[in-house]
């Protein structure tokens, strides 16, 4: 799917040529105009980390960053990311080192089935970029566009608050006699 | 004698090993698989709630470039169904469609867009029939018959049971509380849509990769419907993106991708759209319930009678079992002297209902716990105290004869009472704010499989490599609940190896021994026990070899923290990899097998007594705190304290996750969710926007409290945690609304309109 980097060739009839970066790598690809960014990532580039939960912008499982801002890849036409930088969940870990948010999700048990996790993480990355030490309430607002059906959000909130360096014991039960 | 070593790893808070894949996007779900030459399939679905198929013309679809095949009901004319006695549906409707969305044909084409165009081009000639959506109307003599498999009229199953003399018990009661309740249906809405891929190999082997919770049952049904020998079929279940019961029976798409792969010789994938997931449904049944419950003046419960009318939708699904569960599972944790159940499930022209987390028992639990709250009010007793006085004891049988071997319900009540500061809140908070309590119990697996057979319900095989690695092979279904983590933990505990040296292979009928599936909260109990037995047997042989090498008694050798150690001589130890090598040298290739069979002596001998019979029972208590806005009717659930008796928390962090998720899902049903249909049978809002799921902003703070009452049957005493903790959510919130504003909302969900109407009705009543 990736054409040679310097190739200026006209795209096949009906296809639109794009040049963008995905997780730091240059990508040149020709897509039908109706191709969504999610289809580009999953079908053309084999980056299946971003999930399709609804294909309608309701669930947030496909959240990726475009030029650092969170977008719903299922509602974003691929042609609109020409010349821009796309980051997916696959970009977060550096070699063997997990991103602090990923590590916090693991440590806090914030991923159960894991289907919402990639989108949830990308929204959390965007939140921490804007609000470095978010309160639990700020995390609730920052992740309001991402549905999770397994966790009740409790441990996701714990993880993001902790990754931001805040106290992560808000939801712990009060001490009690046993 | 040397006493057994205390558990080294059981009970520790450790991350789920599978979480590393989840957070890096590496978990490969079904839809993440693609194969060279793969075709994409799409279903043609009925636009009518009830209509006869006069003719299907596939020629316009087949004429489109890129379309490879179209199949109809004639290609798969075999009835299927998860319950062997109630197989009442075809993979594709044969003669008539019985709900909007009933599939009648399936196309395979080179890509999704072409498949969608082809599906639209299939021409179906319909003869529209009268339809019925309301379960009460469906019972009338003049109602159209929805499904020819009905026992009579539209009844799929009717159950009448009585234990003790209910009339006498109610007659001697000083107070009787009663209510009519209506539980609107809800659906699972797992974030991962259903998906299946069929592959046919020229030498005659069919592989189906599917988002199923029940690979074994799917395996059997594929063989039957497709007319293939079971040994020619492989079912692979990748990790699931949530299921909650919504993937626990065969679906149209699995049969269709298999048949289309056999016809075309190419891999065929079918991925439901989100709208299709709503129509596939198999979610929580709508139920009308009437419940009466008596007590003597001292707060001793007497008799109870429950009548339910269950709206089943167009097909049976698990309905036979649902009809029993709708009454059999209210008989604990509180002791009843007599109990009568009259439960009826009817067909209607809507998507079939089935099991959702807390199958069949969440609806009657709502009715029962609210009625207990009414009773406490009439008696002038604190509702926690009333529950305490009537709690069953370990070793006791319920009125319908289920044996309760362990019960931590009093601890659950104590924990939520303390954590929520109940004594300073109940009946004392300002108008508009209130607290409510509810309790429940649930099965840890079912003692009888879906098809009768004398074989084990779960088996595990272990393979030991001379590198020191141990591989666990299990048919258990991984769907985020931590099945693989549980198997890793038990293997690590018993063999003393580091969890990082353990690989778990699950969900592949070619590679793993049988497990009946991820339903009825059975995995820790059954796959866990099978794993425990396999690992203990293997550990015993390794210890014997080490003991012989050291010339010491067997009891002195323990396998702990990556080593075989001499417990009498602290200096003598051997890395496990060395112990395995010595054992392999003496015994040959190392491995182990274990299986689990359920106890058969824990239930009554009456018809239906096996349904609800479980190896062990879990218990839960919730306290919910709510704020009711009397101007808008909006109920805001602020906090839920949930204490759950899981027997033994093998990993408390994962147990908490199950409790929190259960509380959330019950809360969602209480406040937001309803799976409802227009008069013409169309779903009111088949999307994740219109079918309202709680977000981070809606969901209450949840305090999960783990209670332990080790059960003799469970591995290390463990019982379930995946479904039980959902049950009290809804009635605890209902009872809190009553504490807040003094009205009872007996119909779900507790939407602003219903709250305002109840407040207005009270005002008019003066």
Image (tube, helix red, strand yellow):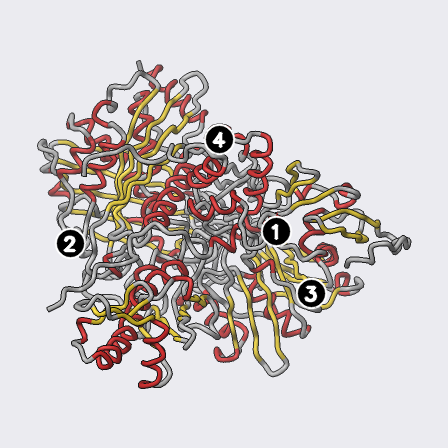
Above or below, comparing residue B456 to residue B372 in the picture:
below
Q: Are marks 3 and 2 in contact (CB under 8 Å)?
A: no
Q: Are marks 1 and 4 in contact (CB under 8 Å)?
A: no
**Which residue carries the number 1 mark?**
A90
Task: Between label 3 and label 2, give the one nearer the viewer.
Answer: 3
Using the numbered discs, state the Cα–Cα distance from disc 1 to disc 4 in whole angstroms: 28 Å
- The dot on residue B397 is 2
**Which residue carries the number 3 mark?**
B39
The residue under the point 36% across, 36% down is B702
- Are callouts 1 and 2 both on one chain? no
Crowd around label 2: few <14 · some 14–19 · many ≥20 (10 Å) = some
Quarter of the picture containing the C terminus of chain A is top left
- Are callouts 1 and 3 both on one chain? no
Using the numbered discs, state the Cα–Cα distance from disc 1 to disc 3 in whole angstroms: 27 Å
Residue B200: percent from the left, percent from the top? Answer: 61, 75
Chain containing the residue with disc 3: B
**Which residue carries the number 4 mark?**
B697
Whichever of callouts 3 and 4 sits on the residue coming sooner in the sequence is 3
Whichever of callouts 3 and 2 sits on the residue coming sooner in the sequence is 3
Residue B134: percent from the left, percent from the top? Answer: 46, 43
| Secondary structure category for the residue under label 4 | loop
Task: Between label 1 and label 3, give the one nearer the viewer.
Answer: 1
Using the numbered discs, state the Cα–Cα distance from disc 3 to disc 2 in whole angstroms: 55 Å
Residue B698: percent from the left, percent from the top? Answer: 46, 31
């Amino acid at each position: 799917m990736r054409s040679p980097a310097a190739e200026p060739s006209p795209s096949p009839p009906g296809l639109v040529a794009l040049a963008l970066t995905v997780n730091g790598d240059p990508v040149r690809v020709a897509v039908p105009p109706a191709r969504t960014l999610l289809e580009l990532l999953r079908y053309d580039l084999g980056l299946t980390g971003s999930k399709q939960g609804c294909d309608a912008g309701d669930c947030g499982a496909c959240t990726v960053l475009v030029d650092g801002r969170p977008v719903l890849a299922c509602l974003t036409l691929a042609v609109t990311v020409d010349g821009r930088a796309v980051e997916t969940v696959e970009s977060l870990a550096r070699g063997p080192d997990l991103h602090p948010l990923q590590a916090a999700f693991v440590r806090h048990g914030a991923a159960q089935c894991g289907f919402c996790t990639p989108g949830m993480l990308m929204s959390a990355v965007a939140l921490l970029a804007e609000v470095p030490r978010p309160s639990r309430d700020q995390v609730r607002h920052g992740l309001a566009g991402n549905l999770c059906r397994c966790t009740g959000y409790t441990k996701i909130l714990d993880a993001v608050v902790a990754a931001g360096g805040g106290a992560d014991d808000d939801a712990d039960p009060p001490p009690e006699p046993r | 004698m040397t006493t057994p070593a205390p558990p080294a790893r059981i009970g520790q808070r450790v991350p789920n090993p599978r979480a590393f894949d989840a957070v890096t996007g590496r978990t490969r779900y079904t839809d993440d698989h693609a194969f060279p030459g793969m075709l994409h399939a799409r279903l043609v679905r009925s636009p009518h709630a009830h209509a006869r198929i006069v003719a299907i013309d596939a020629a316009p679809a087949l004429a489109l470039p890129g379309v490879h095949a179209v199949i109809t009901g004639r290609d798969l004319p075999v009835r299927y169904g998860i319950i062997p006695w109630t197989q009442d549906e075809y993979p594709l409707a044969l003669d008539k469609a019985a709900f909007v969305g009933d599939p009648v044909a399936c196309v395979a084409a080179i890509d999704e867009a072409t498949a969608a165009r082809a599906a639209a081009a299939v021409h179906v000639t319909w003869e529209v029939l009268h339809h019925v959506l309301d379960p009460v109307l469906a019972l009338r003599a003049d109602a159209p018959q929805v499904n020819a498999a009905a026992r009579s009229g539209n009844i799929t199953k009717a159950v009448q049971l009585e234990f003790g003399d209910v009339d006498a018990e109610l007659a001697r009661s000083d107070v009787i509380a009663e209510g009519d309740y209506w539980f609107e249906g809800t659906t699972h809405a797992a974030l991962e849509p259903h998906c299946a891929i069929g592959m046919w190999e020229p030498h005659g082997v069919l592989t189906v990769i599917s988002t199923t919770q029940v690979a074994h049952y799917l395996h059997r049904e594929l063989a039957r419907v497709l007319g293939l020998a079971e040994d020619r079929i492989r079912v692979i279940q990748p990790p699931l993106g949530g299921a909650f019961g919504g993937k626990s029976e065969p679906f149209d798409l699995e049969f269709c991708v298999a048949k289309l792969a056999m016809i075309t010789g190419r891999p065929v994938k079918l991925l439901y759209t989100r709208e299709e997931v709503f129509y596939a449904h198999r979610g929580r049944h709508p139920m009308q319930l009437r419940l009466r419950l008596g007590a003597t003046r001292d707060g001793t419960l007497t008799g109870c009678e429950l009548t339910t009318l269950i709206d089943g939708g167009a097909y049976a699904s698990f309905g036979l079992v649902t009809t029993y569960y709708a009454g059999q599972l209210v008989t604990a944790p509180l002791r009843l002297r007599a109990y009568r159940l009259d439960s009826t499930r009817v067909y209607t022209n809507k998507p079939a209902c089935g099991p959702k987390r807390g199958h069949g028992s969440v609806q009657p639990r709502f009715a029962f716990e609210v009625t207990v709250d009414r009773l406490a009010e009439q008696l002038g007793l604190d509702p926690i105290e009333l529950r305490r006085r009537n709690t069953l004891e370990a070793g006791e049988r319920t009125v319908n004869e289920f044996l309760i071997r362990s019960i931590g319900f009093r601890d659950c009540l104590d924990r939520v009472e303390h954590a929520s500061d109940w004594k300073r809140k109940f009946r004392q908070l300002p108008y508009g704010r209130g607290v409510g309590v509810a309790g429940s119990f649930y099965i840890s697996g079912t003692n009888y499989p879906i098809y009768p057979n004398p074989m084990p319900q779960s088996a595990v095989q272990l393979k030991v490599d001379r590198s020191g690695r141990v591989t666990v092979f299990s048919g258990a279904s991984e769907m985020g609940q931590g099945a693989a983590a549980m198997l890793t933990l038990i293997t690590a505990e018993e063999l003393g190896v580091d969890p990082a040296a353990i690989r778990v292979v699950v969900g592949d009928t070619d590679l793993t021994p049988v497990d009946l599936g991820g339903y009825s909260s059975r995995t820790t109990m059954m796959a866990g026990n099978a794993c425990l037995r396999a690992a203990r047997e293997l550990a015993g042989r390794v210890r014997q070899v080490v003991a012989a090498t050291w010339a010491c008694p067997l009891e002195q050798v323990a396998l702990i923290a990556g080593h075989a150690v001499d417990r009498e001589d602290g200096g003598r130890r051997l890395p496990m990899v060395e112990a395995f090598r010595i054992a392999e040298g003496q015994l040959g290739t190392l491995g182990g097998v274990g299986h689990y069979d359920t106890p058969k002596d824990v239930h009554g001998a009456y018809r239906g007594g096996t349904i609800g019979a479980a190896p062990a029972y879990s218990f839960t208590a919730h306290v919910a705190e709510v704020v009711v806005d009397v101007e808008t009717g909006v109920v805001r659930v602020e906090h839920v304290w949930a204490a759950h008796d899981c027997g033994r928390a093998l990993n408390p962090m994962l147990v908490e996750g199950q409790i929190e998720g259960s509380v959330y899902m019950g809360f969602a049903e209480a406040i937001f969710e309803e799976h409802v249909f227009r008069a013409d049978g169309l779903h009111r809002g088949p999307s994740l926007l219109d079918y309202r799921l709680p977000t981070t902003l809606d969901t209450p703070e949840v305090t999960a409290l783990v209670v332990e009452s080790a059960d003799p049957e469970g591995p290390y005493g463990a019982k379930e945690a995946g479904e039980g903790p959902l049950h009290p959510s809804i009635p605890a919130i209902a009872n809190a609304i009553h504490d807040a504003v003094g009205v009872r909302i007996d119909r779900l969900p507790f939407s602003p309109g219903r709250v305002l109407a109840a407040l207005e009705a009270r005002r008019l009543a003066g």
